[in-house]
Image (cartoon, rainbow, N blue to C red):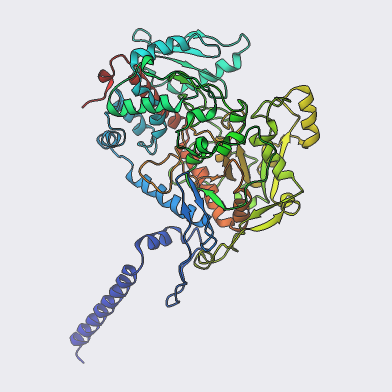
């Protein structure tokens, strides 16, 4: 065969082979579900235990589906896979979708703001955006917590708000600061703190310090701040709903338009057709029962499960509510007070709080820097952590303990009692053994099994109060010392041995959450206090999501602890999943919870506050 002819034949053979290869690859790609394929490509290296059935192997029959309820829970179907697989899968998909749709320009951010909130952004929004861009603040659209705090005040006449502000300034326990055209820096104009309240004043100064570098760009305003742990602005449902309706209609109310307050109780903050109104909890609680065993539920929307109107058991199981027994009288109007935390039943305005950690202890990583190192020298990498028990240490806070209080039912007290009990049993959904994803997720979870606390508590739980009882009268302190063991506080080195750490409310929100999230441990969190960073995503609705995502960055736990043992059992078995959430949580803390992120939040919050309290609100709109 001539050389030229041989060359032509070889060239055509190579072309034919390439065409066949392209067709095979294209066909294989097209028959894959697009999300599953991208999921596999993204996570194959980091998740070798998760794989799909070999080519040609028959797929297993589909399993039953779990149920998402309107109160923020997932109800487990025993004929479905373990529900935590679905919760992680859905949460990660929602988190990725949110990151991809984040605004990239000022014009996009303004359009997104108008679409979400049905009004223009506040005056100064452009300079706020410049700060966000300069400091690489992530998720610039996700400030729905500010909307939740400020929106009710749009329904109150601004002159009425000014009168309420004047009354608030006379109340004990608040500090009033102002910023004027003549003085561009915030200054304290009135302090009603006790003479020994230096620590309290420092707390307020630390909050205001967030805006030191941007206060020259803030409009004039006057505000009152409480430095105490608990919220106090308890809302009447009727008054708050009237204010929200007026805000939606573009009208305002005066105090004369509001109904009088004639009844007390936490249920006054709930709608007439809510579970709390229809089926209020029995108070006082008769005992400290074990968590409910059936049906098995897990948190899908953390914020919804913080709502006592939907979950009236919270009124009988958390010190925030038990401290007031059946509950106080609601405020006769909406009071624009800044507080360090709030609940769904309160209308306190919540700033970011830099409590309990050092901004410089763990600087922001470089773009491609590995996030697997320790937040502190004593915090071991995941692979070197040897203790797989759930770790918690804390004081007897959360509710004042006396013969007249219902302290035994407090959230911390119930946790320590449950985790140290050697009597009784709990129902636990056993996690399928770790293996190939396809096989594990195709296994029905089955019915929960009864487990003796005497067998699982010593090996699963390391939970204890520390030092000695506090927040109690002498007789009750002595009683508490006989009920529970009190251990020494853990150092960072000892804490760093644990893979799983629990974060629980104290007298208010948890001040250790940031530090724990920056560690290499997997953080379990039970709370009723939505935080500045945590407008929690509902897995059934992706429109309004969060700056942090449960099941992506941490593990949410119900205040009843009904899901605690199931969740611990799952992650003890699925170490790779636990490690991945721990690493994602640490990366989130280092990139989304920096000083600049808290400044951006406070900056935007104060722009909104200045507008809603202005006597000429329209002049405070950002219009371009």
Asked whether residue 221 is in view, the answer is no
Seen from the viewer's position, the closer of residues 381 and 612 is: 612
Tell me: residue 485, above or below residue 442: above
The spot of residue 298 in percent (x, y) is 54, 49
Q: Residue at x 23, y 80 (%)?
A: 11
Seen from the viewer's position, the closer of residues 433 and 268 is: 268
The spot of residue 619 in percent (x, y) is 25, 18
Q: Residue at x 35, y 7 (%)?
A: 182
Quadrant in the picture for the N terminus? bottom left
Relative side of 144 to 47, left or right: left
Quadrant in the picture for the C terminus? top left
Q: How many marks?
A: 0
State the image quarter where residue 29 is shown: bottom left
Seen from the viewer's position, the closer of residues 319 and 565 is: 319
Seen from the viewer's position, the closer of residues 619 and 331 is: 331
The spot of residue 368 in percent (x, y) is 44, 46
Asked whether residue 285 is in view, the answer is yes
Relative side of 215 to 510, left or right: left
Relative side of 1 to 150, left or right: left
The spot of residue 70 in percent (x, y) is 44, 45
State the image quarter where residue 483 is shown: top right
Q: Residue at x 60, y 10 (%)?
A: 194
Q: Residue at x 68, y 27 (%)?
A: 405
């Amino acid at each position: 065969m001539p050389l030229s002819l041989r060359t032509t034949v070889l060239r055509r053979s190579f072309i034919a082979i390439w065409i066949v290869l392209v067709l095979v690859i294209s066909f294989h790609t097209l028959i894959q579900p697009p999300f599953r394929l991208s999921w596999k490509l993204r996570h194959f290296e980091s998740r070798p235990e998760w794989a799909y059935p070999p080519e040609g192997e028959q797929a297993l029959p589909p399993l039953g589906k779990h149920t998402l309820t309107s109160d923020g829970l997932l109800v487990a179907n025993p004929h479905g896979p373990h529900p935590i697989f679905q919760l992680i899968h859905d949460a990660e998909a929602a988190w990725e979708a949110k990151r991809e749709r984040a605004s990239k320009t000022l014009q996009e951010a303004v359009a997104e703001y108008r679409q979400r909130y049905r009004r223009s952004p506040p005056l100064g929004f452009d300079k706020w955006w410049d700060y966000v861009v300069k400091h690489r603040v992530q998720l610039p659209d996700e400030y729905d917590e500010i909307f939740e705090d400020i929106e009710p005040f749009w329904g109150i006449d601004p002159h009425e708000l000014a009168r309420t502000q004047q009354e608030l300034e006379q109340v004990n326990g608040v500090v009033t600061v102002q910023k004027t055209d003549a003085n561009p820096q915030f200054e304290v104009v009135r302090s009603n703190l006790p003479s020994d309240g230096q620590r309290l004043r420092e707390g307020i100064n630390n909050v205001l310090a967030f805006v030191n570098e941007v206060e020259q760009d803030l409009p004039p305003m006057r505000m009152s701040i409480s430095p105490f742990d608990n919220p106090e602005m308890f809302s009447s449902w009727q008054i708050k709903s009237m204010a929200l309706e007026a805000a939606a209609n573009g009208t305002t109310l005066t105090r004369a338009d509001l109904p009088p307050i004639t009844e007390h109780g936490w249920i006054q903050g709930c709608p007439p057709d809510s579970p709390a109104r229809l089926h209020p909890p029995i108070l006082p609680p008769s005992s400290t029962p074990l968590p409910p065993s059936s049906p098995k539920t897990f948190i899908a929307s953390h914020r919804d499960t913080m709502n006592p109107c939907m979950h009236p058991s919270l009124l009988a199981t958390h010190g925030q509510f038990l401290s007031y027994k059946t509950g106080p009288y609601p405020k006769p109007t909406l009071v624009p007070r800044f507080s360090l935390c709030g609940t769904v039943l309160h209308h306190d305005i919540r700033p970011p709080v830099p409590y309990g950690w050092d901004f410089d202890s763990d600087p922001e990583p470089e773009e491609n820097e590995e996030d697997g190192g320790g937040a502190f020298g004593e915090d071991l990498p995941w692979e070197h952590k040897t203790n797989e028990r759930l770790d918690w240490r804390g004081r007897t806070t959360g509710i004042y303990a006396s013969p007249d209080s219902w302290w035994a039912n407090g959230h911390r007290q119930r946790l320590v009692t449950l985790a140290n009990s050697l009597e009784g049993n709990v129902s636990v959904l056993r996690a399928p053994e770790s293996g190939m994803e396809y096989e594990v997720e195709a296994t029905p979870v089955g019915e929960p099994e009864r487990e003796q606390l005497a067998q699982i508590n010593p090996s699963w739980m390391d939970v204890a109060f520390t030092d000695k009882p506090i927040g109690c009268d002498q007789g009750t302190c002595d009683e508490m010392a006989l009920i529970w063991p009190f251990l020494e506080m853990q150092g960072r080195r000892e804490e760093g041995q644990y893979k799983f750490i629990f974060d629980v409310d104290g007298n208010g929100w948890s001040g250790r959450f940031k530090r724990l999230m920056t560690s290499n441990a997997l953080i379990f969190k039970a709370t009723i206090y939505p935080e500045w960073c945590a407008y929690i995503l509902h897995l059934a609705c992706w429109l309004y999501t969060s700056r942090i995502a449960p099941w992506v960055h941490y593990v949410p736990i119900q205040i009843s602890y009904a899901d605690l043992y199931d969740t611990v059992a799952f992650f003890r078995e699925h170490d790779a999943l636990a490690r991945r959430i721990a690493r994602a949580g640490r990366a989130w803390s280092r990139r989304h919870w920096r000083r600049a992120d808290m400044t951006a939040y406070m900056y935007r919050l104060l722009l909104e506050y200045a507008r809603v309290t202005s006597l000429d609100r329209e002049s405070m709109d950002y219009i371009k």
